[in-house]
Image (spheres, rainbow, N blue to C red):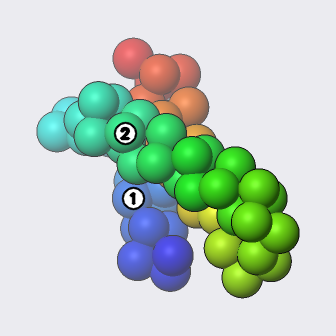
Amino acid sequence: MVMTLPQIWTVWVDGQVAGVSVLSWGTYLLGACLWFVHGLARRDKAIYVACIGWILLNGAVVLGVLVQR
């Protein structure tokens, strides 16, 4: 998760979105959402708690790209 922070910084602070794929980051976001639902269904806290972080981080990148364009 820590390695996603520089991408968020680049998109939100530097305002550089060239080369950032909304399709890729949106797919990562979708995957995290699906794993979150799976974790809830299995009542596996280790899965769904980690997915909350991924959803927030991936969502920040996707939202940042959409706002900057």
| Label 1 – label 2 distance at C-alpha | 16 Å
- Name the image quarter holding residue 60: top right
Q: Which residue lies furthest to the top in this view?
A: 69
- Residue at 49 percent of width and 68 percent of height: 5
| Circle 1 Cα neighbour tier, 10 Å, few/some/many (<14 / 14–19 / ≥20) | many
Residue 7 horizontal side relative to residue 1, left or right: left
Residue 10 vs residue 61, the one in the foreground: 61
Residue 4 locus on image (x, y percent):
44, 67
Q: Residues within 10 Å of mark 2 (few under 14, many from 20)?
A: some
- Above or below, 45 against 26 in this view is below
The residue lying toward the viewer, choosing from 37 and 54, is: 37
Position above or below: 44 against 30: below
Q: Does residue 49 appear left or right of residue 16 in this picture? A: right
The image position of residue 65, as x and y in percent, is 43, 31
Q: Residue most toward the left?
A: 19
Which residue shows up at 46% across the image and 48% down it? 31
Q: Which amino acid type is shown beneath numbered disc 2?
A: Thr
Return the residue at label 1. Answer: 7
On the question of residue 25 being in view, the answer is yes
The residue mark sitting in front, 1 or 2, is 2
Residue of label 2: 27
Decide if residue 60 is in sight here: no
Q: Position of residue 69 (x, y in %)?
A: 39, 17
Amino acid type of the residue tagged 1 in the rendering: Gln
Secondary structure type for disc 2: helix
Q: Which of marks 1 and 2 is nearer the N terminus?
A: 1
Q: Do the residues labelled 1 and 2 touch (CB within 8 Å)?
A: no
Question: Is residue 60 found left or right of 21 in the rendered image?
Answer: right
Q: In percent of the image, x 56 and y 31: which residue is there?
A: 63
